[in-house]
Image: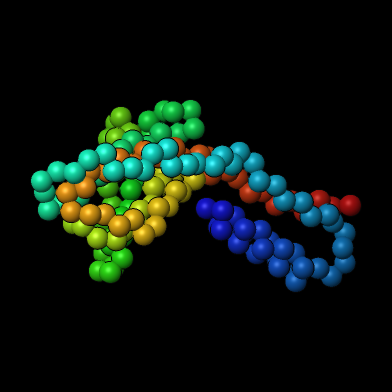
Amino acid sequence: MNNFIKLLSILFFILSVSCKTAKNYTEYSELEGFENGKVLRNEVVGFADSTLVKISGKIVNNNNEPQVLAEIQISKILKKQKQIWQTDFNGQYQISLEPGIYDFSYRLAGMDTIKLNNLNLQKGELREIDISLGKAGTLTHYLIER
């Protein structure tokens, strides 16, 4: 999300520079309401006699409120497969995967996206990943006439 905001700021700057003939206005941009999300927990809590990896966790906001139907997108690196899961009404999720190297992306509309890249998940691993999502914020660009 931060890259998107930076890209949008650059786009506004380029447009404003290329459209100027006479400077009869002042430019102003502001980012409001942005809160950083964070990984609260990412640890192996045990191993099971299984060929699969079991991942569970909870997604909350910065006020520790469960985020219902938040999206967890998981991409297996070598096979280029993508799968999407959602949290339940308590903000919790449980996923079973084959062992391998994965990228995880946690998101919800209007919230910051949290990414965990290159997680090497081992056979039988029981892992808990808890995430706190912050507000995505709003970028506003003004042209004020003089």
**Is residue 94 positioned above or below 9 on the image?**
above
Q: Is residue 72 left or right of residue 48?
A: right
User: Is 94 in front, or is 125?
Assistant: 125
The structure residue drawn at horizontal position 42% and vertical position 52%, both measured from the top left corner, is 115
**Is residue 3 positioned above or below 19 on the image?**
above
Across and down, in percent, residue 5 comes to: 59, 55
Q: Is residue 94 visible?
A: no
Across and down, in percent, residue 10 comes to: 67, 63
**Is residue 30 positioned above or below 102 on the image?**
above
**Is residue 9 positioned above or below 57 on the image?**
below
User: Is 47 in front, or is 56?
Assistant: 47
Quadrant of residue 25 within the rendered picture: bottom right
Q: Is residue 61 left or right of residue 71?
A: right
Across and down, in percent, residue 74 comes to: 31, 55
Q: Is residue 83 visible?
A: yes
Quadrant of residue 44 within the rendered picture: top left
The structure residue drawn at horizontal position 52% and vertical position 40%, both measured from the top left corner, is 135
Across and down, in percent, residue 90 comes to: 30, 29
